[in-house]
């Protein structure tokens, strides 16, 4: 399984200037906790996308290799035009016939990854995005049809209370890149970033089946504030 971990965004810093994914929770960084779950998947091909400045300043390659030697660390020299472009930076490391899992390092989704992936495989879909209940304008939102398929994903404009996390499963990596290519060509004359709601909307336009994987709101931790971090620490403490 191909896995892309996104950690190169401009909002990845915590208040102490370290990347948020290096925040320590019970003597382990958030990145370690995330990788612990992902490394339990069958044949994970993990690619961590990081900012070059952070990579050198915090010795991220050395840190990650101490967690697991097989993890690829890809440095991005400059800020890209959104999460989609960052994901495309690891194209040479991916197996195109395999599944693809994409997630953000600056958030934590409390779920069983094996159960999530098995559900995606059994749900007759080409892509799924984890969603939760919210009305905050920082998120993207999805609109479902009567059959539970996503009709469209909206940025900052909620047609429902179903907000999107950054955790996305895609059945076939090759389809991800084919749709990404079409989207980039469409957007080439327009300024601004391209986000994952754009690529999933491209899937929908191409006739692919895209569905939500719904979780409880208290199982999602966006890490946008100290309060979010405190809630995540409490979540881990309750499981000890």
Image: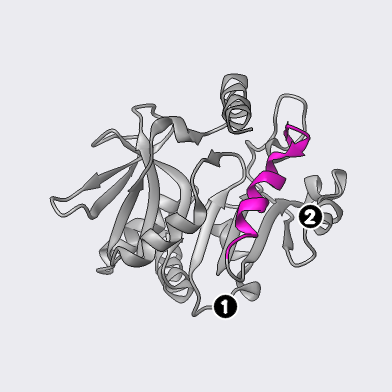
Q: Residue at x 79, y 55 (%)?
A: 67
Mark 2 nearby-residue class (10 Å; few <14, some 14–19, many ≥20): some
- Asked if residue 224 is positioned above or below residue 198 in the image, the reply reads above
Check disc 1 and report the residue beneath it: 95
Farthest residue, direction bottom: 97
Q: Quadrant location of residue 46?
A: bottom right
Check disc 2 and report the residue beneath it: 67
Q: Quadrant location of residue 171?
A: bottom left
The image shows residue 201 at horizontal and vertical percentages of 32, 57
- Asked if residue 240 is positioned above or below residue 87 in the image, the reply reads above
Mark 1 nearby-residue class (10 Å; few <14, some 14–19, many ≥20): some
- Secondary structure state at the residue bearing disc 2: helix
Q: Residue at x 61, y 40 (%)?
A: 106
Q: Quadrant location of residue 77?
A: bottom right
- Asked if residue 217 is positioned above or below residue 213 in the image, the reply reads above
Q: Is residue 237 magenta?
A: no
The image shows residue 140 at horizontal and vertical percentages of 38, 40
Q: Residue at x 61, y 22 (%)?
A: 230
Q: CA distance from mark 2 to mark 1?
A: 22 Å
Q: Residue at x 70, y 34 (%)?
A: 13
Q: Please identify the quadrant where the N terminus is shown.
A: bottom right
Q: Residue 225: give its label.
A: none
Residue in the foreground of this view, choosing between 158 and 188: 158
Q: Please identify the quadrant where the C terminus is shown.
A: top right
Residues in magenta?
23-41
């Amino acid at each position: 399984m191909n896995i892309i971990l996104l950690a190169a965004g401009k909002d990845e810093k915590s208040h102490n200037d370290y990347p948020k994914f290096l925040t320590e929770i019970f003597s382990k960084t958030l990145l370690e906790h995330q990788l612990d779950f992902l490394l339990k998947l069958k044949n994970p091909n993990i690619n961590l996308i990081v900012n070059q400045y952070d990579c050198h300043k915090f010795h991220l390659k050395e840190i990650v290799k101490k967690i697991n030697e097989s993890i690829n660390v890809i440095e991005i020299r400059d800020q890209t035009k959104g999460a989609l472009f960052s994901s495309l930076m690891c194209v040479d490391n991916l197996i195109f016939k395999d599944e693809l899992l994409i997630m953000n390092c600056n958030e934590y989704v409390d779920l069983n990854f094996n159960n999530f992936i098995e559900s995606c495989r059994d749900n007759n879909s080409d892509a799924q995005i984890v969603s939760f209940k919210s009305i905050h304008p920082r998120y993207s939102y999805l609109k479902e049809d009567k059959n539970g398929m996503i009709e469209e994903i909206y940025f900052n404009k909620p047609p429902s209370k179903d907000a999107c996390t950054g955790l996305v499963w895609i059945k076939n990596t090759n389809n991800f890149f084919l749709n990404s290519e079409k989207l980039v060509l469409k957007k080439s004359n327009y300024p601004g970033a391209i986000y994952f709601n754009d690529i999933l909307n491209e899937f929908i336009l191409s006739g692919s089946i895209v569905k939500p994987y719904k979780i409880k709101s208290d199982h999602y931790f966006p890490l946008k504030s100290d309060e979010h971090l405190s809630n995540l620490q409490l979540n881990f403490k309750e499981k000890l």
